Amino acid sequence: MKKSLIILIAMMAVLASCNDYETYGDKKEKERNAIAKYISDHSILVISEDQFNQQGHTTNLDRNEFVKLDKSGVYMQIEREGCGTMLQDGESTQLVCRFEEYDIMNDTLSLCNNDNTLRFNGQNLAAVPDLVNIARESGSYKASFTKGVMYTVYGATVPAGWLVPMPYIKVGRPEAADQDCAKVRLIVPHSQGHASASSNVMPYYYEITFQRES
């Protein structure tokens, strides 16, 4: 009798463990729900890629439009197109990036490079821009961080979601009062995020500016 009771308790523990197990599908569903809630809470109007193209690759800021890009699943708003020229095919350069990264699931600011109070592993992160080496070849973009907060925390690999705006923005360096650098807002699903986002199935929201270093 005692032996049977021990077996029954062990089986119940196994079943409880199975019930607590979260599948990849479960995590993706949580991510979709978190993104949908973020969109609703921030009164974002999602437009199709076709409408985005018809509008000349612009998003209406007064209507708080974000385009959902079909291939990547990234939601993008272009606040400023930028100045100068787009990155040309066959060209490589170094970009200076300022950003804020928000953890959508936990509704918190997780990283930025314009706030000296932000800490990582007990150390203050310097308020310096991130530097990105980027190249365009046959319409595709390759990039790596060489310095900055993203490099320190996540490593050299630039999230694929960060490269999504490249075909639509100019990356020149402002040289006059009426010029400004490109600025975008992104909702990046885990599949287009950094390694931590991918492994934990976590979506992130970004505000990023891009300009050439020189």
Image: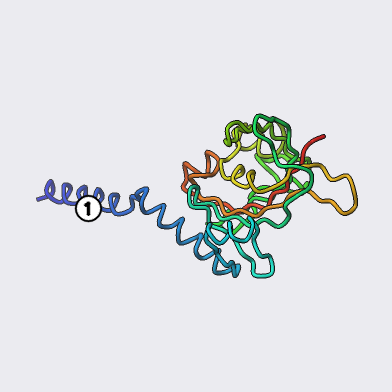
Q: Give the x, y percent position of residue 3.
A: 12, 46
Which color mode does the image show? rainbow
* Numbered-mark total: 1
Residue drawn at (66%, 33%) of the image: 134
Q: Give the x, y percent position of residue 110.
A: 63, 50
Q: Residues within 10 Å of mark 1 (few under 14, many from 20)?
A: few
Identify the residue position indicated by label 1 in the image: 12
Left or right of residue 45: residue 152:
right
Quarter of the image where one finds residue 91 = top right
- Comparing 126 with 177, the one in front is 177
In the image, residue 134 above or below residue 168: above
Q: Secondary structure at mark 1?
A: helix
Quarter of the image where one finds residue 213 = top right
Q: Amino acid at mark 1?
A: Met
Residue drawn at (46%, 48%) of the image: 201
Left or right of residue 1: residue 159:
right
Q: Residue furthest left?
A: 1
Q: Give the x, y percent position of residue 131.
A: 73, 35
- Comparing 179 with 43, the one in front is 179
- Comparing 49 with 202, the one in front is 49
Quarter of the image where one finds residue 132 = top right
Q: Give the x, y percent position of residue 169.
A: 69, 47
In the image, residue 180 above or below residue 148: below
Left or right of residue 170: residue 54:
left
Q: Quadrant of the C terminus?
A: top right
Residue drawn at (37%, 48%) of the image: 24
Residue drawn at (49%, 51%) of the image: 73
Left or right of residue 90: residue 19:
left
